[in-house]
Amino acid sequence: MSHSTATGHAAAIMFPNDKEDQRSDDGEVLWVREHQLAPRGLHGDAVLFSDESEVVFKTKGLKAFIQNEDESEDTPLGEGPLKCFLEALANMEKKFHAKGLYKNCALQTYLVTSRDPVITGTRALKTLKSWGLEITQAFFLSGRPKGPLLKMIRPHIFFDDQKPHIDGARELGITSAHVPYGIGYETYKGAAKEPKKPVSST
């Protein structure tokens, strides 16, 4: 599936995996589902936010990207394909909070992004604030691999726009969803279409 801007429906390509722990449908597991944490991992650019900053990064490089985010710190990023999904999760979370369930809330959301926590991450947080949305925790990895963090969080589902990150999460046994949107997806499609060079024998 792909994101539909015409209808406003968010969609992603789901990749279940064989390494995930199997759950039965007996009463005990239903209780666990209701009361234990159910974290979701969400990528930032081209997932929650538009790919406008990603375009700068891929076309002009890291230095231009950092400068753009610094100069645009107080300008909210555009809405990405899963912004409406985060809104739905936030509304569900508010219902738990209304019952006094904060620490034991059955729903948690994490922002996992390659942005750094100081310059480029500030714009992301200010964007969420301008939308009136809160997340459980944000992780700014400054370009480091996402795998070690995802292994620690163990989200029930991880969303990302870049297929290599999806593949890495699946190798860890994490159910993942690829969001085919923006310049990252276009780059991925272009690379997939390129014919492989024949290996010459010596």
Image (tube, grey):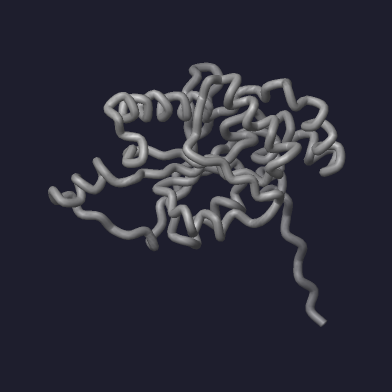
> Residue 137 at x, y = what percent?
51, 41
Residue 104's quadrant in the figure?
A: top left
- Out of 2 and 126, give the one closest to the viewer: 126
Residue extending farthest to the left is 27
Residue extending farthest to the bottom is 202
Q: Is residue 165 left or right of residue 97?
A: right
- Out of 180 and 173, give the one closest to the viewer: 173
Residue located 82% across and 27% down the image: 71
Residue located 27% across and 27% down the image: 99
> Residue 46 at x, y = what percent?
63, 34
Residue 89's quadrant in the figure?
A: top left
Residue 73's quadrant in the figure?
A: top right
Residue located 18% across and 49% down the image: 25
Q: How many marks?
A: 0
- Out of 3 and 103, give the one closest to the viewer: 103
> Residue 42 at x, y = what percent?
52, 40
| 176 to 7, vertically: above or below | below
> Residue 96 at x, y = what percent?
31, 30
Which quadrant does the C terminus fall into? bottom right
Q: Is residue 188 left or right of residue 166?
A: right
| 198 to 26, vertically: above or below | below
Q: Is residue 137 left or right of residue 18?
A: right
Residue located 46% across and 28% down the image: 85
